[in-house]
Amino acid sequence: MKKFIISILFLMIWSTLYCQRSIFQSKQAYLGQHPPGENPEIFARQMLTDSGIAIGRVAFSSDGRDFFYSFTRHWFNAQGSGTNLIHFDGRRWLKPRLIAKALTLPTLSIDEKSLYLLGEGNILWKAAKKKSVWEEPHPYLHLPYDLYNFMPVISGNFYIGTNGTWGKLYDYNKYNFSVLSIERNDTLVKSLGMPLNRPGFNGDFYVRPDESYMIISTNESADFESELYISFRKEDETWTPPISLGEKINMGKAHRFGQYVTPDGKYLFYTSGTNEEDTHIYWLRFDNLLEKLRKQAQSGRR
């Protein structure tokens, strides 16, 4: 009951943040880009290419005025990587500004006063927002196991991709979608088990802050090509068998990761590509598709 009450309070705070000064219903929303339909389109190609390869998960603030994205020069190489911020000042979107060098996968805390970032190794980095200015990131959490992905949720827990206590460091075949809880200086990690996790690498995901659904990269090949599937959390806190997001998204072999749903719930973002030259951040209208997938999961159809 206590966790339920805390979740409701956080949800109220999160909803309040979203409603304040939101530009999501204006023409300036989403960097002023023309919204797509249910067919994936490359997002803001001309605005993000100066940084190299725009890659991985993005993040919008709840009012839609801050956009965070990561970039790199080459796949599987942290050199030349980092995270930029593009801010809407009330009149226009400003030029990208570097806020973290060699750190990627930006994730806002629920209260949006902190930004979590990942680099090489098993260290979680954190940047604090003071008077509308993001400070330099600093090491926040050093885990005894690999940390590939990290997202906070309203309940106070964190979802991560990790090999936890059941695998050796850098053993990617032991990565599981997991939940991390932090009590003072102690951490406890627990795999989400089946049906979310499959043999092999399970690291790329997006979880809605209320934990109502997860979008995972699955069916990983030996070269880490994958497809995007979705699973819904049931009342007993177990998860439905993951189902495909459909052929429009999962057409052909490609690396698909960095999935993210905007705070207003309307659009899905993800990174897709078969090589460095054709890797882009895509987006598509998602709210109607989400409801179709929810009904499909409830009916038990795969």
Image (cartoon, grey):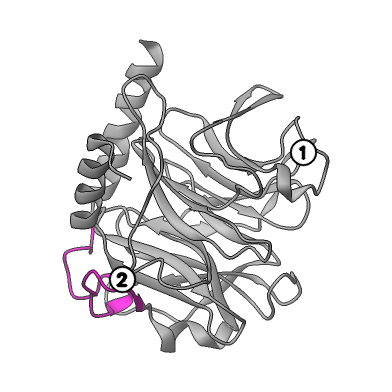
Q: What residue type is labelled 1?
A: Tyr
Residue pictured at 42% horizontal, 41% vertical: 111
- Decide whether residue 193 is among the magenta residues: no
- In this picture, residue 49 sits left or right of residue 302: right
Where's the N terminus, which quadrant? top left
Q: Is residue 211 above or below residue 139?
A: above
Question: Where residue 30 sits: x, y (%)?
Answer: 31, 71
Please check the rendered image and state whether residue 37 is part of the magenta-colored stretch, yes or no.
Answer: yes
* Disc 2 from disc 1: Cα separation: 36 Å
Q: Is the magenta stretch mostly helix, strand or loop?
A: loop
Up the image or down, 288 lies above or below 273; here it is above
Secondary structure beneath disc 1? Answer: loop
Q: Which label belongs to residue 70?
A: none
Q: Name the residue under label 1.
A: 145
Measuring from the top left, give residue 74's x and y in whole percent. Answer: 69, 79
Amino acid type, residue under disc 2 in the picture: Tyr
Residue topped by disc 2: 30
Q: Is residue 32 visible?
A: yes
Q: Quadrant of residue 2 in the image?
A: top left
Residue 140 in view (yes/no): no
Q: Where does the C terminus fall, quadrant-wise? A: top left
- x, y percent for residue 291: 20, 48
> Where is residue 124 shown, x and y percent of the image?
68, 46
- Mark 2 burial class by Cα count in 10 Å: few <14, some 14-19, many 20+: many
Q: Nearer the viewer, residue 71 or 259?
A: 259
Query: In screen coordinates, is 141 left or right of 65?
Result: right
Stretch of the chain drawn in magenta: 22-41
Secondary structure of the residue carrying tag 2 is helix
